[in-house]
């Protein structure tokens, strides 16, 4: 009884081994280079294809939409896009799964590892837009109570900003966990009577802001620009203690000690090193790609509020602004 | 294998009296257990309190983030050179890409005419014309929604993922079905694979395979293979001893017996396994899009970025339809197996001739599509549903959010639920000293089970403390309990109503199908719009997701109550209410317990989605771990969720004192 059982098991193991061997032979013998993998859904155009990483916020989608449209219609490339969070995107970039990130808000650790140490990623210069993170209150509230735009007065209005999530403190709403934030440290170090409530995703945060705005309720939220939501819900920034290099240096040592505003960040592009060297006209084009906040917002607005597809939004912008993008095309 | 001890003698009328805690206190064993625990507590609590205090002692925590970070760095550094990656994992991922690409190109080559016809004819052969019609409609709808290409991508990925899951699951199940030791080893592994939130293992998979289809497929297989393994093992173990004896006495070897007797006898379970695997794989389609799995899931995920419920729904509907078609087809195939397999109708509709016919017609239609020059769904034939859906959502939110007369609006409900239920629960659980929590768990688990189940439950809770996530776990536990109670109250109520009325059940069926298969990402935005960011929308999402299973199991359990018992109760002049309370519910107890168990598992599965709408605690930690590439944070929170599930299962599922293991 037990002997036949062991035999059957042994046969099973044998079969699985054979199956494994078949699997290996499927993909050819010898070394398998995991960095040279296309998506199975990529068009079979091999040499003329570029993969761009899209981040989850709409501004990043706009960069990619326009770059994609021009690469396809002006330079004859096939473009694939992959939407992933920022840190996994860096990882994918170093492996060559994606060729370029067009908007990065600053990841010193990743830069140290991949750009400086491993040299698998190359910095690609700015994309022309300057990003800024801060605390914002809705304009309809700030107009009535101008004092709320200074952090020193926030404790006076904490009671107005209470929700069932923040208990007896005011609510400071944060969004996606992947975004850069020092809000917990700021609340603690500035002795504010506020609870940081994480919405958990940008979609949830935007939905909540729209909901507050509909009811004309006061709120305080972590937000950033450029962002299309400002066109729907006008917001005013709350003044935090001035950002200084000293404060930044202290913050890099110990993030929990930060007590000043967020910096303004010129948003950066990054390329896979291989692609930067051998990417031909696509790499040349993406290196030159650079536009303004207004350009980006125009595209973002058509995607997010007018409900156009990213491709249609890009086409609309490209038709309107040939003077901007003509400069990006590589010299023939 | 000893036989089970006979269960407690039944009361009159063949009705088992329910064993509530009160009942258990009456019999002496329960009292003795409690007394013993009280003695232990009296001795241990003062000592522990003096030593450590009420919060989980820091001395008893293990920090696992260091080694995990080392591991992740090692993987990143050696990915391109180490033999493990170059000669093994690399081939694995290439094979995946090749096979998915092969299926995808085949689907594209067939064109929309060929694919639609092929699937419809296949469904007709296997499951009859009604389901064939559903299949036909589903694919037409996918095309109309402008989702043809993503649907094909998802289908290609699903075909390969389900095939791999079925093979892997069947092999594991075979091994577990043939060897008791392996069965015992595999059970906890399978449990963990299913309860560990997929988000928690997305990051390790991405580290190894990089983003893209191979990683997505592997994550899907991890999630979808366990049901196949379980049901295969169950089928093999449940084979009729008489038949096996007969085949052994005819001199069949072990392998012959497996192939000619055990596997055919387990056909039903095997097909049910395939069915479950398909459903699980589809539910991963969207989650896998977070790591670059293209297809429909990716469309849902991208629509979220611009907060566009309509666009998300347009991509989600094909997923729901695919799931329903596949579910019905495999379920019908399973039912047919039990019945006489010969199809009715003329000879050319049976056996190989029919299959040839299916192939020929498919090929012909594919050719027609090709000649007509429309391989991809014609762009002109698309219907835009995004705008009307968004308008409807706006309208609904505007009217329900606040200021509904008498009952108040959803925002007020959410606030009350948070203030009156969630906050006290959370504060109570976090304020509860850790040894108190362990004792409570031990008492509950021991009262309805054995010392072993009690020990498991206590160890699971202790593991949470050791991992250093006691506080967020208590927060999550409070949310899970609240959502679970709401789910069970609603589920039992609706289930009882549906059991009493065939019409209601028929109306509910498609609604429940949609609720079960709708990707959770889609209702992320509506729940926030209705209930405001926080723990309330997280609970709402959990209830929506877990309710269908509870309703279904309750209805089925009540329906299957022995008619003889019902009849005798009726002849004794019992009213409908009495019958329900004293006959039906007690007799349906196993089904109700299963409903509780499924409720626990499903509510825990939505903890992560809760993290995306402001639920915080463990769910948020798992999401953060993935987003920031922090292996330790995500995995620890994921394991804590598994431990919570284990503990809840042990304190809600009574176990008899017996030495045999339960089924898989």
Image (cartoon, coloured by chain):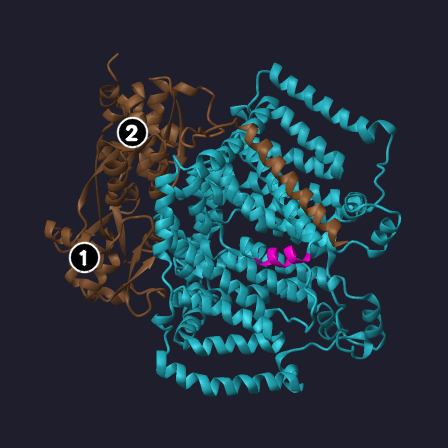
Chain colours: A brown, B cyan
Q: Position of residue B199 (x, y in %)?
A: 45, 50
User: Is residue B359 depicted above or below B581 in this figure?
Assistant: above
Which residue lies under the disc numbered 2?
A273
Q: Position of residue B131 (x, y in %)?
A: 71, 39
Using the image, tell me which numbered label, if any, was put on residue A236: none
Quick one: A311 or B92, which is closer to the camera? B92
- The percent coordinates of residue A220 (x first, y second) are 26, 57
Q: What residue appears at the point 50 percent right and 69 percent down from the top-left corner?
A: B459
Q: Are marks 1 and 2 on the same chain?
A: yes
The secondary structure that dominates the magenta segment is helix
Q: Nearer the viewer, residue B144 or B212?
A: B212
Residue at screen point 27% across, 22% down:
A285
**Horizontal side of residue B260 vs B62, given as left or right:** right
> From which residue to which does the magenta span run?
B180-188
Q: Secondary structure at mark 2?
A: helix
A187 vs B90: above or below: below
Chain-order first, disc 1 or disc 2: 1
Residue beneath disc 1: A258
Q: Quadrant of the C terminus of chain B?
A: bottom right
Residue B662, percent from left and from top: 68, 63
Q: The N terminus of chain B lies in which quarter of the figure?
A: bottom right
| Residue A105 is at least partly visible in this image | no
């Amino acid at each position: 009884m037990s002997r036949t059982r062991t035999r059957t098991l042994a046969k099973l193991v044998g079969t699985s081994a054979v199956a494994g061997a078949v699997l290996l032979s499927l993909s050819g013998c010898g070394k398998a280079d995991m960095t040279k993998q296309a998506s199975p859904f990529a068009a079979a155009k091999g040499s003329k294809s570029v993969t761009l990483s899209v981040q989850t916020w709409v501004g990043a989608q706009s960069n990619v939409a326009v770059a994609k449209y021009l690469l396809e219609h002006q330079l004859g490339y096939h473009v694939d896009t992959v939407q992933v969070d920022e840190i996994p995107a860096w990882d994918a970039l170093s492996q060559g799964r994606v060729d370029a990130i067009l908007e990065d808000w600053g990841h010193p650790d990743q830069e140290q590892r991949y750009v400086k140490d491993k040299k698998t990623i190359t910095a690609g210069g700015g994309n022309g837009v300057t990003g800024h993170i801060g605390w914002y209150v809705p304009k309809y509230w700030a107009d009535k109570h101008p004092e709320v735009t200074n952090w020193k007065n926030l404790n006076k209005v904490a009671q107005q900003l209470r929700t069932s999530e923040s208990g007896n403190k005011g609510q400071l709403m944060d969004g996606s966990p992947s975004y850069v934030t020092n809000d917990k440290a700021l609340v603690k170090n500035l002795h504010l009577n506020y609870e940081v409530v994480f919405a958990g995703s940008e979609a949830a945060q935007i939905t909540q802001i729209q909901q507050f705005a509909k009811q004309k309720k006061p709120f305080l939220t972590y937000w950033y620009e450029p962002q299309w939501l400002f066109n729907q819900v006008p917001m005013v920034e709350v003044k935090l203690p001035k950002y200084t290099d000293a404060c930044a240096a202290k913050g890099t040592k110990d993030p929990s000690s930060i007590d000043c505003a967020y910096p303004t960040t010129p948003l950066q592009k990054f390329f896979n090193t291989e692609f930067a060297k051998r990417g031909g006209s696509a790499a040349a084009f993406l290196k030159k790609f650079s536009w303004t906040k207004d350009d980006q917002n125009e595209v973002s607005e058509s995607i997010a509020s007018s409900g156009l597809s990213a491709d249609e939004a890009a086409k609309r912008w490209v038709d309107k602004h040939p003077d901007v993008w003509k400069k990006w095309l590589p010299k023939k | 294998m000893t036989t089970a001890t006979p269960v407690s003698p039944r009361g009159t009328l063949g009705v088992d009296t329910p064993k509530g805690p009160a009942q258990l206190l009456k019999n002496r064993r329960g009292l003795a257990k409690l007394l013993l625990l009280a003695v232990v507590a009296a001795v241990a609590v003062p000592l522990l309190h003096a030593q450590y205090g009420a919060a989980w002692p820091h001395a008893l925590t293990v920090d696992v983030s260091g080694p995990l970070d080392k591991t992740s760095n090692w993987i990143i550094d050696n990915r391109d050179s180490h033999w493990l990656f170059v000669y093994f994992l690399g081939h694995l991922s290439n094979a995946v890409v090749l096979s998915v690409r092969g299926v995808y190109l085949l689907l594209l080559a067939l064109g929309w005419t060929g694919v639609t016809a092929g699937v419809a004819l296949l469904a007709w052969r296997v499951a009859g014309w009604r389901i064939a019609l559903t299949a036909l409609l589903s694919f037409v709808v996918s095309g109309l929604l402008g989702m043809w290409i993503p649907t094909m991508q998802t289908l290609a990925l699903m075909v390969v993922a389900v095939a791999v899951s079925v093979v892997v699951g069947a092999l594991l199940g075979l091994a577990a079905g043939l060897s008791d030791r392996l069965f015992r080893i595999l059970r906890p592994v399978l449990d963990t694979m299913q309860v560990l939130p997929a988000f928690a293992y997305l990051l390790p998979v991405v580290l190894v395979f990089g983003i893209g289809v191979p990683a997505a497929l592997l994550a899907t297989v991890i999630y979808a293979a366990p049901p196949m393994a379980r049901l295969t093992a169950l089928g093999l173990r449940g084979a009729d001893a008489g038949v096996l004896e007969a085949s052994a006495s005819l001199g069949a070897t072990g392998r012959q017996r497996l192939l000619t007797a055990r596997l055919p006898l387990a056909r039903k379970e095997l097909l049910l396994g395939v069915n479950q695997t398909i459903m699980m794989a589809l539910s991963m389609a969207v989650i896998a899009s977070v790591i670059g799995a293209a297809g429909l899931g990716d469309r849902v995920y991208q629509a979220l970025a611009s907060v566009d419920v309509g666009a998300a729904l347009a991509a989600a509907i094909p997923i729901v339809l695919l799931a329903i078609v596949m579910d019905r087809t495999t379920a019908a195939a399973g039912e047919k197996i039990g019945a006489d397999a010969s199809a009715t109708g003329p000879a050319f509709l049976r056996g190989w001739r029919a299959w040839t016919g299916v192939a020929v017609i498919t090929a012909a239609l594919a050719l027609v599509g090709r000649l007509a020059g429309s391989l991809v769904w014609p762009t002109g034939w698309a219907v835009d549903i995004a705008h009307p859906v968004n308008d409807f959502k706006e309208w609904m939110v505007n009217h329900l959010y606040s200021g509904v007369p008498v009952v108040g609006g959803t925002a007020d409900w959410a606030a009350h639920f948070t203030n009156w239920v969630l906050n006290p629960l959370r504060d109570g659980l976090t304020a509860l000293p850790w040894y108190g929590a362990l004792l409570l768990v031990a008492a509950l688990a021991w009262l309805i089970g054995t010392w072993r189940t009690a020990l498991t439950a206590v160890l699971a809770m202790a593991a949470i403390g050791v991992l250093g996530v006691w506080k967020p776990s208590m927060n999550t536990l409070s949310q899970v309990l609240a959502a679970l109670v709401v789910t069970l109250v609603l589920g039992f109520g609706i289930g009882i109503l549906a059991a009493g009325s065939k019409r209601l059940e028929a109306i509910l069926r498609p609604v429940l199908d949609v609720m079960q298969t709708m990707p959770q990402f889609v209702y992320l935005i509506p729940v926030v719009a209705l209930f405001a960011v926080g723990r309330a929308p997280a609970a709402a999402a959990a209830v929506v997701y877990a309710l269908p299973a509870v309703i279904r199991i309750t209805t089925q359990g009540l329906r299957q109550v022995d008619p003889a018992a019902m009849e005798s109760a009726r002849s004794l002049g019992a009213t409908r209410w009495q019958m329900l309370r004293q006959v039906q519910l007690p007799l349906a107890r196993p089904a109700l317990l299963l409903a509780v168990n499924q409720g626990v598992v499903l509510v825990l599965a939505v903890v992560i989605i809760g993290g995306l709408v402001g639920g915080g605690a463990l769910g948020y930690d798992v999401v953060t771990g993935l987003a920031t590439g922090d292996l330790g944070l995500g995995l620890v929170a994921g394991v804590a969720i598994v431990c919570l599930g284990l503990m809840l299962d042990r304190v809600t599922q009574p176990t008899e004192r017996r030495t045999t293991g339960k089924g898989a």
